[in-house]
Structures are given as C-alpha cells and as structure tokens.
Image (cartoon, helix red, strand yellow):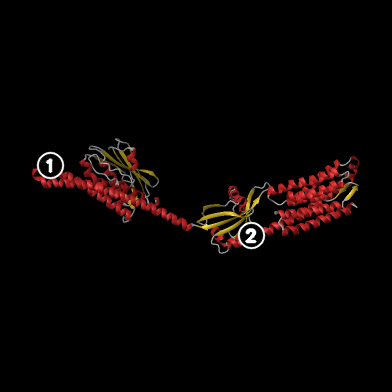
Amino acid sequence: MIIIELIFNLSLLVAVSVLSGFITTRWKRDTLLGVILQGILFAGVALLGMLNPFELTPGIIFDGRSVVISVCTLFFGPVAGLMVTLTALIYRVYLGGGGLVTGISVITASYLIGLLYYYKKRKNRTPIRTFDLYIFGLLVHIAMVVLLLAMPSGMRMIAFKTMSFTILGIYPLATLLIGKILKDQEENTALMENLAAGEREFRLLVHNMNQGMAVHEVIFNEEGTPVDYRFTYLNEKYEELTGFRKADVLGKTIVEVVPKISQKTIQKYAQVAITGKAIHFESYSREQKIYYEVEIYQSSENHFAVILSDITLRKQAQREIISKNKSLEKINEEKDKLFSIVSHDLRSPMNGILGLTGMINNEIDSFSKDHIREMAQSIHTSASSIIQLLQGLLEWSQLQRGNIIFNPQTVSLLSSVQRCINILNESAKAKNIAIICKVPGTFNVFADNQMLESVIRNLLSNAIKFTPKGGQIEISASESSLNTVVVSVKDDGIGMNATILDKLFRLSAKINRKGTEGELSSGLGLIISKEFIEKHGGKIWAESEENSGSTFYFTIKTSVNAY
C-alpha cells in the first residue's frame, strides 16, 4: 500500500509542477497575483495529498506535504509557502491523532528550511544547483525523521522502522525531481525575459545609431560578489571604435578578452547594473588613437550597456583653441613689451639727443670746445643705445615672424668668440675692462653662426654694461656631456638679487636696469638669446649674487647627431 500512496503523491507533485509552469507563463512569479496563484495551486495539492495519505495507524499519516511546502517556499517565496503551510496546518489539526505534534512540527520545519534556502538563493543571485536541490530535500527529511521522536512512545519505533528508508531515500529524490522541473521552468522563464528585454533594447537603441554600443551581463561568484561580465551584444560602430570583433568577443567574458582588466573596473561597471546609477566619463585609447565619451547605464537587471562616442575631433579643436589662446597671450605680451621699449627705452635717449642738440643750436657760441666734446660724447652714447636697441628690435621682430633662416653647420667656437670680442673691444676699453678668453681652440660646435655670435655678443655686451671701470670679464667653455659644450660668460660686476634673476629671459617681466655708467638696458637681448639657444636644442641660465658679479651659461651641441 505504501508504494501506491507514494506513486499517487508523486504523480500529484509532477502534475502541480506542470500547472505551475503554465501559471508562470501567464502571471510572473515576482508579481503578487502570480505568487498567490502558485500558493493556491500548491496548497490544493498538499491538501489533496493529505486526503490520500499512507496511514501507519489511526491518526499517524505520511504524505508528500513536506515536499510540497519546502519546494513551494524555495521557488515562490514566503507568501506562497505560508499559504501552503497554513492550509496544511489547519487540516492536520483538524485530523488530530497521535501524530499531531509531529505533523505540525514537520509542516513548520519544511516551511522554515524552504524559507532559509529561498533567501540564500536570492542573496547569491544565482539559480540553485541540481546537487543543492538534493541536499535541500535531504535536510528537510532529516528534520522530518528527527521529529518522529515527538510521536507517542508506543508508535515511535514502528514509525522509524517503517518510514525511515522511505523518508530519507524516496522523499529527497522526489524533492529533487520536482525542484529540477521548477528550476528548469525558472531558468527558461528568465531566458525568455532576457530575450524579450534584449529585443526591446535593440529596437530602441541600435537602429541608426552613430555611437558604438555593447551590452554586458554581470557574473557573480557564490558569495554574490560581481567578478566578471560577459559580452552579450555589440554593434558595428563599437567594433569600429574599439577594434573588438563580434565573432571574437561575443559570449566571452571581459577577463577572457582583456586579461589585465582590474577588479576595481569590473566592480565599478557592475554597480551600474545592480544599482541602476549611470556613469559618464571620457577616455583615450592608445591603440586606436581615439578619444571616447563613455556612457554606462543599466539596460536590465544585472546587465549594463556601454555607449561610446568618438570625440577625437572635438578634443583636437579644444587643443587648437588652447594653443591659439596661448599664442594670443604671447602676442599680447610681446605687444606690451614692444610698447614699453618704444615708450621708455627708445624715448629716453631720443629725448637726451633732442635736448643736447637744442642746447648746441641755441647756445653753441657760449660753449667751450671741451664742453662741446662732452656733449658730443653724450649724443654718441645715446645714438649707440638707439642703434643697439633698434638692432635688437629688428632681430626679435624677424624671429617672431619666422624670417630668420636657421642654418646650422660646424663652426669653430673660438673663432666666433674672438670675432665678438673684437667687435666689443672698444666698448670694453672705454670702461677699462679686460676681456679674457679661455675657450679651447679645439672646440667645434654645430650651430647657426649668426645666431651663435648674436648670443655671445649679447652676453658680453651685458657683462660690459654691468661691470664697473677696471673690471674683468672671462669667457670660457668646457665639455659637459657627450656632444655638448657649456659656454660661460663671467664678470665681477654689480651682480643681481634673486628678484631680478627670476625676471631674466621673461618677455612679460620689466627690469629696465641701467648699467654702471648709466647705460640703458631693455632685456630684449637676453630674450633673443634664449630663443636662439632653444632653437639649437640648448639651455641658457644665469647665476648671480648682488655685488658679487654674474655668470651666464648656455649649452650648444658639438655635432649634428646630437640634435
């Protein structure tokens, strides 16, 4: 008889599984109506099984209610499980008998174990495995066997001997069978829902899309932590922008495609799929040489979509705007410097010349020859300053317009230095300044000779200007590294403090410092020298202390291979 009752109960369970699948196709199991309908269905089957049980003795019955209650709670949640549990409890209390306490305990335990597994399954966000279903059924019915102890002592051993094998051998297998059917239905339903969601995404986002798009499914470990994500879709534009090919990456995980991807990045993107909070940022691909605007949003539960827009042209335009702004700032600085030079440095000597020539014109008869000679010397000095300034302005203007031809070749450094000393020798003699040359005759440099001599003249002229009468200037050169020579111009003049030193070589800075004999200085020569040296790939700098002289340095290459 027990076999017949078990077959009957098993048939009921299979039938309820099929009917449950039908209900799921019409009313989703995550809706209240779907849950209630599943609860009614399983409650009816539990009641039907209890109406046709295996009766060990009057008041002690065995049926499939433990399987029905536990499986319903596991797959359909606490509400549906509670409906079945209450139905079974009410009917079992109605039946009464010696097995009442055990019956109530088994019903309650089946519900609680089902509830525990239900929440565990939700936390892990993964479908329950087939093996886990068997363990689940075994736990429910181990609890049932233990609860047989609550039976009257006279029936306890009979129940153990008669039902233990059936409870621990057959009932877990029945749980596995029904659970597997419901599990497959659950997975098939999820698959159909995913396919429908994917179709909607495709219709809404992909048609006529000018951006790259890929859809990913987040993969969780057993603890429910996102550890990877899988490519489920990508369009042609995405292939074009990233270099990924659909045939190579579709169905694969990001770890398989990009093994070096960090878990931090995976977690960041997975949070979009979990929380629904979209993110937006810009990125650059060195391989594709493309700037991207990236938008990542939740496309469906545990899925996220990546939208890529090519913003390379926009970035190039932004860089051009920044470059143009810098050029305009530089032009404004140059304009301000030019106005400053014209208004101050050029006007001062011109005013001096006008004043002196006016005096000569009006009062020449009253001047002695020595006085006239002195005035002529002042006029000569002012005119020389104007010529020097105009020459600097002309060089600077040509340099800014790109009219100076850069023609480097191998030249003798000593020969260039000697020519510059010869040109400035008279100015040095006028202040009784000695210029000592310590440049080795063996040094050849690869340079534009006109630019090189312009730099040397500017540095020597500055040294003469800021060195008092009877002083000394030393120009020397030494090898600093492979294919590089350092040239230095050292004086024992008035030197500079840190503020003036910081302003050197800067077009926007105003110095306007006069020499030891009142010589004018615009600072333009040093700016021109800096641009000439940098055009050669070298550096120029100065070291100085107030009242302790100054030393100016610049580097120059010794061969064409050094560039």
The answer to whether mark 2 and mark 1 are in CB contact below 8 A is no
* Crowding at mark 2 (Cα within 10 Å: few <14, some 14-19, many 20+): some
Q: Which mark is residue 198?
A: 2
Q: Position of residue 205 (x, y in %)?
A: 58, 61
Q: Which mark is residue 371?
A: 1
Any part of residue 535 in sight: no
Q: Position of residue 367 (x, y in %)?
A: 10, 42
418 or 432, nearer to the observer: 432
Q: Which mark is residue 504?
A: none
Residue reaching furthest to the bottom = 208
Residue reaching furthest to the top = 547
Q: Quadrant of residue 197?
A: bottom right
Q: CA distance from mark 2 to mark 1?
A: 102 Å
310 or 519, nearer to the observer: 310
* Crowding at mark 1 (Cα within 10 Å: few <14, some 14-19, many 20+): few
Q: Secondary structure at mark 2?
A: helix
Q: Position of residue 410 (x, y in %)?
A: 33, 52
389 or 472, nearer to the observer: 389
Any part of residue 40 in sight: yes
Residue at left 34%, top 38%? 498
Q: Secondary structure at mark 1?
A: helix
Q: Quadrant of residue 198?
A: bottom right
Q: Amino acid at mark 1?
A: His
Q: Is residue 382 above or below residue 404?
A: above
Left or right placement of residue 356 versus residue 252 in this view: left
Mark whose residue sits in front, 2 or 1: 2
Residue at left 37%, top 43%? 479
Q: Amino acid at mark 2?
A: Gly
Q: Earlier in the sequence, mark 2 or mark 1?
A: 2
Q: Position of residue 463 (x, y in %)?
A: 27, 41
